[in-house]
Structures are given as C-alpha cells and as structure tokens.
Amino acid sequence: MRVIFIVPCFNASRNLHALVSSLMSQNDNRWSCVIIDDISTDNTFEVANSIPSNKFATIKNNNKKYALRNIVETTRLYENRDDIVIAVIDGDDMLCNDNTVKLLLDEYENNNSDVVWTAHKWDINGMNISSEIPSNVDPYSWKWSSSHLRTFRSSLIKNISDINFKDCSGNWFKRGYHQALMLPILSLTKNRKFIPEVCYQYNINSVSIENRSWEEKDQISTINIVRSRGFLK
C-alpha cells in the first residue's frame, strides 16, 4: 500500500515550503503528493512546480473548483485501487510527525481499516478536536471528530454519488468541505480508526484566508445541509 497526499491550494506559497519539508522528512517512503493550485493570485504554482523531487505532481486549474471538488475528482482517478490511501492536507497546513505515513499504513495493513484519522494541533494553542467515533453510531448524527488529517481507501469513493458533495442547486460545496467529504465516507464502513498521536498541524492563522467571518458563515451553512439530509444514494 501507499499514501497519496492531495493538497488543494489557494495562495499557499508562504506555507508550501514547510508542508513539503514535513512530507520529505517522513521515515516511511511509501507516499507521493499531488499539489493542486486552485487559481491562486500569488506564486503558489511556481513554488509547487519547482520542488526538486519526483514524489510531487502539480496541477494548475483553469477554473476555480475549491477544495472539495479538487479532492473528489483526484480521488476518483484511483477509485478502482484498493491499495491506495488518500490523505488530505490543506495547502496552508503541514504534518508534524515524521512517523505519520508509517502509522497510517500500519493501521490500514494490519487492521484492515477503511478510514483513519489522527490527532492534530492548532498552531495558536495546540488544541485538538479529533476523537474516536464508535462503530455503532451514524457519523451524520455524531459530533464532528475526524479532523484534520483525514485519510481513507480510495476505493470507497466509487460508492458515493457526487450529489453528496453538492448543494440543492447542484453546485459543488465551496466551504465546509471537511464534513461534506468525510461524513459520506465514514457512513460507508464501520472499519474506522482514530490514532491519538498528533500528526497534523492546523495553521488557523493562515495567510490565504482574508475574511474568516464570511468563510465560517458559509462553512456552517454547508455543514447544516450535509447533516440534515444525510447520505444520498
């Protein structure tokens, strides 16, 4: 098995070097990374495209897709592979544990898990809101727990219609993608695992977010829609 990190980016050039360094320092080499520049107005693409390693691939969008659509469309390229683990890192965040890839793959290989997430820390105070989700509960009605390092077998995505990722007008969700992505995936399996080791650093003081108030309001709207309607077949 191997891990493919999907990194959707918007104006993340100042953070990319730290993110790349956190991947290159992994003590397990079974990974690769796809960095997606989503119409940045800075030099995100140039920074990403200059990384001196063949473990990184860079995509430059011609139209704005936002994180969720970028993640889903890239994952669908691997939907017939059961040996691929998809892991999502926001372009302005980073890993903070050199053992992350090994921890993930050990869990998938040894315990046949389908979805795995880890503890994380916020850059401002070290806070972690991730925790275990009991196997006998509906993730849609359970408190949000699978944040921020979200990983899953790529083959799960083929069992999820894109309507789960879109609003009532058929438009892809722009914000709140964490729950819009993970709740359908979590609902497909009971083989889900929380790893308590801190592996991910969430940079809440991201330079890519200019209006956090608007971002948060739009995110709440997405979450309310996703949770109220549940899994759509």
Image (cartoon, rainbow, N blue to C red):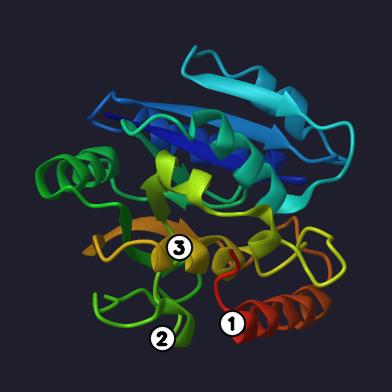
Image quadrant in which the N terminus is located: top left
Give yes or no for contact between labels 3 and 1 (Cβ–Cβ under 8 Å).
no
Q: Residue at x 39, y 76 (%)?
A: 145
Taking the spot 44% from the left edge, 58% from the top edge, the residue there is 201
- Label 3 belongs to which residue? 148
**Residue 228's quadrant in the figure?**
bottom right
Disc assigned to residue 83: none
- Residue 219: image x %, image y %? 71, 76
- Quarter holding the C terminus? bottom right
Q: Is residue 13 above or below residue 27?
A: below
Q: Is residue 219 above or below residue 53?
A: below
* Among the two numbered marks 1 and 2 on one chain, the one whose residue lies closer to the N terminus: 2
Query: Would you place residue 142 above or below residue 96 in this image?
Result: below
Q: Give the residue number, with chain letter if any, for mark 1.
A: 227
**Amino acid type at mark 3:** His
Q: Amino acid at mark 1?
A: Arg
